[in-house]
Amino acid sequence: MKNTEKEKYERPVIKKVEAGMPNKFGLRTEYQPMTHIDGVSVHELAERFGSPLFVISEKTIRDTYAHAKRAFTLRYPKVQFAWSYKTNYLNAVCHVFHQEGSWAEVVSGFEYDKAIANGVNGKKIIFNGPDKSDADIEKAIKNDSLLHIDHLDEMYMVIDIAEKLKKKPRVAIRVNMDTGIYPMWDRFGFNYETGQAWDALNKIMFSGKLELTGLHCHIGTFMLAPYAYATAAYKLADLAIALEKKFNHSIKYIDLGGGFPSKNTLKGSFLPGKDANPGIDEFAEAISTALINSFSNPDKLPLLILETGRALVDDAGYLISSVIANKRLSSGKRATIIDAGVNIMFTSFWYDHKITPAQPFTHYTEDTVVYGPLCMNIDVIRENVSLPLLNKGDKIVIHQVGAYNMTQWMQFITLRPRIVIIDLDRTPHLIRESETNNTLTDLELVPEHLKKFEL
Amino acid sequence: MKISKNVSISENGFIFNPTTGESFTVNPIGVEIINFLKENKTEADIKKQLLDKYNTDSATIEKDYYDFMHMLKASNLLDTSAE
């Protein structure tokens, strides 16, 4: 009998019936295999580009961006997005956002140079972060970028460099504040409640050396409370109105940063993220209402800048991975080992990522722990998940990996894999090569006296 | 290895063990294996029949059969008195 005439194999499985008993594995969530991403076969992608493989959907990025832009422009007349480079600074991804009209928001000299190399006009680069070198600041001033000052030391640096260059740089200050959420991020910028922010604004205005252009805050990450943004917007508006009264100075923009959640499921969350997390419209409503209520003259509303990263790119990223092995743990729990570890899936420390097999399966499931390939105990992609029965060599798709994984990933034990983007015509393009041993060893040097050894 | 005598299994894979009061579900290939065991087929026979029927290799059958028998034992469904 030829193999093709044989029946499809599914390993035998037995499951105890525990009707009504809740458990930490949750209910079965996968009903359909994910055989294609944007019309391209998952198995063919893995065959052509290797496994594991990050896949980015250009269509999802553009659709998500369009939805977010509409959510805000529907409610507020002047809105500008600035792409958060740290969330995903693959050039191809940045280009998609810049094509859509996003400015660049960077937090280091490295990211700043990347934005310039990507062709972003220096005037449309927002430079955040606590660590800007003299050279970074000089470059940003020469390019007329928007410098967001994090601390007084930086303010004096900017004043000093501006004097030397005989230029008046466009600046904003970052403001931190109590918005009723925990933890309160007070390590960045100047505090609102203690008056630090107002003091800094006064110093800037009295210096006469800086052009105070905006006010910035970024209240947290993966925020689930839209009201907190309303509080932030009211407080920044308060500062803007106070500046108007005292100095007759109108700021050009209010930058509310990012921190909106994607649809990922946070660890410990009872409901899946797609059901529990507020949508972008709820944040847009809270922010827009607060700003519109704060300013009396509709013609002088400041530009609203948003630096949202995760909410715009997380859903567009997939990770294709292969099953290396199945084993049974001493507890009786099923363990599945895949070829993608936490070194490239940093976010598996935060989220219960959705995992879908890429080939047809039956309705039988097993409570499973999904391990990565690293010889490290911490390498766990999902601690508890009820998965269809997977065989060695099967492919799986891990969802919502577009944010942070491709910037925070690390070379550890294995080499980092390729990344492809699928365009609007369903054609995959390689946008980052996989690493080779030379990628790393080329950076290393062995001193002469250590070169020889005998074993 | 034998399935305990009083364990009943339905065609669609529902198992009831009156001794412990526990119920289980098994997938179709699991039902086949349990029925083979009830028919007192040898391990070698069972593996050969599975290999002839399904599109897989002997190493996979070997590994999965071993795991399944362990699960049956852990679920108190095997008659271990003859061991």
Image: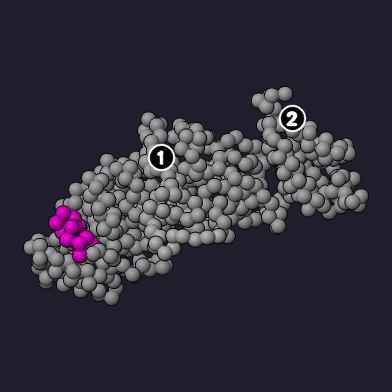
- Please tell me which residue lies in front, B53 or A273: B53
The answer, for residue A291, to whether it is visible in the render is no
Q: Chain of mark 2?
A: B
Identify the residue under disc 2: B53
Residue A158 image point, x, y percent? 17, 66
Residue type, label 1:
Val
The span from disc 1 to disc 2 (Cα, nearest Å) is 39 Å
Q: Residue furthest bottom?
A: A194
Identify the residue under disc 1: A420
> Residue at 34% of width from left, 60% of height from top?
A229
Relative placement, left or right, of A38 versus A186 is right
Q: Chain of mark 1?
A: A
Residue A300 image point, x, y percent? 16, 55
What's the magenta bit mostly, secondary-structure-wise?
helix
Near mark 2 (Cα within 10 A), the count class, few <14, some 14-19 or many ≥20, is: some
Relative placement, left or right, of B77 versus A5 is right
Q: Give the secondary structure at mark 2.
A: helix
Residue type, label 2:
Lys
